[in-house]
Image (cartoon, grey):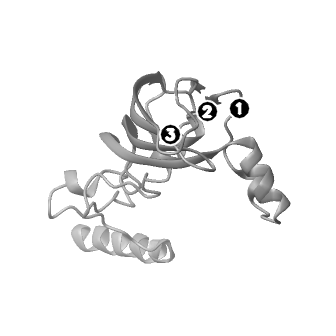
Amino acid sequence: MVSIVDLPRQEGSIRHHDYVFETPQDFGIELMEVIPGSELRADLSFQSVQEGVLVQGSVDAQLQGRCSRCLIDLHDDVRESVAELVFYPESAKALEDEGDEEAHDLPLIEDDHIDLEPILRDALVLSMPFTPLCEPDCDGLCQECGERWNDLPADHAHEFLDPRFDGLATLAAELEVKENNA
């Protein structure tokens, strides 16, 4: 929660603040997340508007995750834009009274404070790829040995014998032994 006590409610009033937060746990999706405990830097401006306060700016974070094809570790520094209207409680109540079904889910200013965590979480998490890749043309893993195709030689192959032909392989081996003994 950050205080906006110094921001006048007069429309058009602007205040600028730089913040450094410690990233909480679970700030991501299955294969990608902001590194827990890392610095989350937010460069934000707060502008008074009729309905509440418009929060705009950018957030910088360090990501970690895994490639969705070959599972190697990924690391990236990102900067994402932030833009969110946070409503005064009376403005949200007026929208709800007018029949706006989503008014009860709007972010609210509470006691001259704004909770930035959901705003920053939305900006970062919604920009993360659901299927992150180490390279756009990542070939993934060899289905036989589990090694990364990109690390294997071009002639990498596995001899695959259908188990239904095991009897024939045994017969061929017996015939070869007979020919060698003859």
Between residues 104 and 109, which one lies in front from this camera angle? Answer: 109
The disc label shown at residue 120, or none? 3
The Cα atoms of the two marked residues, 1 and 3, are separated by 18 Å
Q: Amino acid at mark 2?
A: Asp
Report if the CB atoms under discs 2 and 1 are less than 8 Å apart.
Answer: yes
Task: Judge from the rendering whether residue 84 lies leftward or rightward of residue 76; answer left or right.
Answer: right
Residue 11 image position (x, y, % from top left): 53, 45
Give coordinates of residue 61: x percent, y percent.
37, 35
- Give the residue drawn at x 42%, y 70%: 170
Q: CA distance from mark 2 to mark 3?
A: 9 Å
**Horizontal side of residue 121 vs 94, given as left or right:** left
Q: Which residue is mark 1?
A: 110
- Left or right of 127? Residue 156 is left
- Identify the amino acid type marked 3: Leu
Residue at image location 39% in from the left, 61% down from the top:
143
Residue 76 location, quadrant = top left
Q: Is residue 22 above or below residue 69?
A: above
Q: Quadrant of residue 35?
A: top left
Label 1 environment density (alpha carbons within 10 Å; few <14, some 14–19, many ≥20): some
